Image: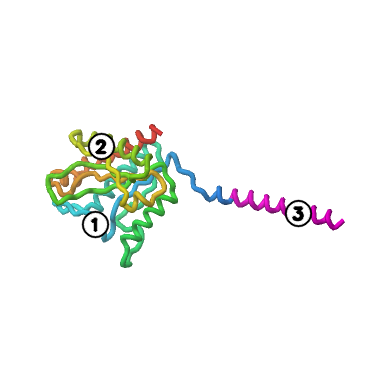
Amino acid sequence: MRKKVEFVFMILLLAALLGAAKYLKSSVSSDKVETGKNVIVVDCGHGGDDPGKVGVNDALEKDINLKIGKLVKKRLKKKGFEVVMTREKDEILDGEGSDNKKVQDMKARVALINKTAPALAVSIHQNSYHEANVRGAQVFYYSHSTEAKDAAQVMQEALLNVDADNKRQAKDNDSYYLLKRTEVPTIIVECGFLSHPEEAELLADEEYQKKIADAIADGVEKYLESK
């Protein structure tokens, strides 16, 4: 009789363990965020008291990034995408008043992108160089991400619609925090050089910003169509 009771107890214990394992598996699966195939994150670099690059025409990178980002959002929404912006006004995301606010800001951007889990994240920036003759848009991607490389190459080609003479190629990088820490394909679009007098004027021009936004939105669409 005792052995029979022990056998029944073991059966019940085994059933309870299997049930718990099944529940745990279900809980873990429900917490996992699936990539949103129709969701794009647009990250407008810098903001608040972080101006980014300052152009030879005194234009601030943070302002140009935001203007282009908003235009990209508008165009992507027209194409049927859901768009999440990391910022829609002149601000940093986190760390205001702290000694390492830039680090906190970057961490907040990465956290937002990873939580959103978009099909693609596009970070918009403007470049600068100590030689005033250097110009041209360029797209950066994380060295160890095949998907990001594909997106960057498609985007680089799309930007030729803005400047057909641009010879720059998509470039890999393994040190940019945003590229390293995001868990989805992420690219950085450097739209041009604020250190180049002519290009700086173009980047501050509303009509030129619209052309860049068109190219970025087209690049996003073409990349996702290829997947």
Q: Earlier in the sequence, mark 1 or mark 2?
A: 1
Name the residue tied to disc 2.
Answer: 159
Q: Earlier in the sequence, mark 1 or mark 3?
A: 3
How far apart, in angstroms, are the residues tagged by discs 3 and 2?
67 Å
Label 2: state its secondary structure: helix
Name the residue tied to disc 3.
Answer: 10
Residue closer to the observer: 204 or 184? 184
The kind of residue tagged 1 is Pro
Which image quarter is the C terminus in? top left
- Horizontal arrangement in the rendering, residue 30 relative to residue 17 (left or right): left
Residue closer to the observer: 4 or 104? 4
Name the residue tied to disc 1.
Answer: 51
Q: Is residue 11 shown in magenta?
A: yes
For the magenta stretch, what is the residue range?
A: 1-26
The kind of residue tagged 2 is Leu
Q: Which residue occupies 32% across, 58% down?
A: 92
Provide residue 16's location: percent of width, then percent of height: 70, 53
Q: Main secondary structure of the magenta part?
A: helix
Q: Earlier in the sequence, mark 3 or mark 2?
A: 3
Provide residue 4's location: percent of width, then percent of height: 84, 53
- Horizontal arrangement in the rendering, residue 211 relative to residue 103 (left or right): left
Q: Nearer the viewer, mark 3 or mark 2?
A: 3
Q: Which residue occupies 28% across, 55% down?
A: 46
Q: Which residue occupies 35% across, 61% down?
A: 104
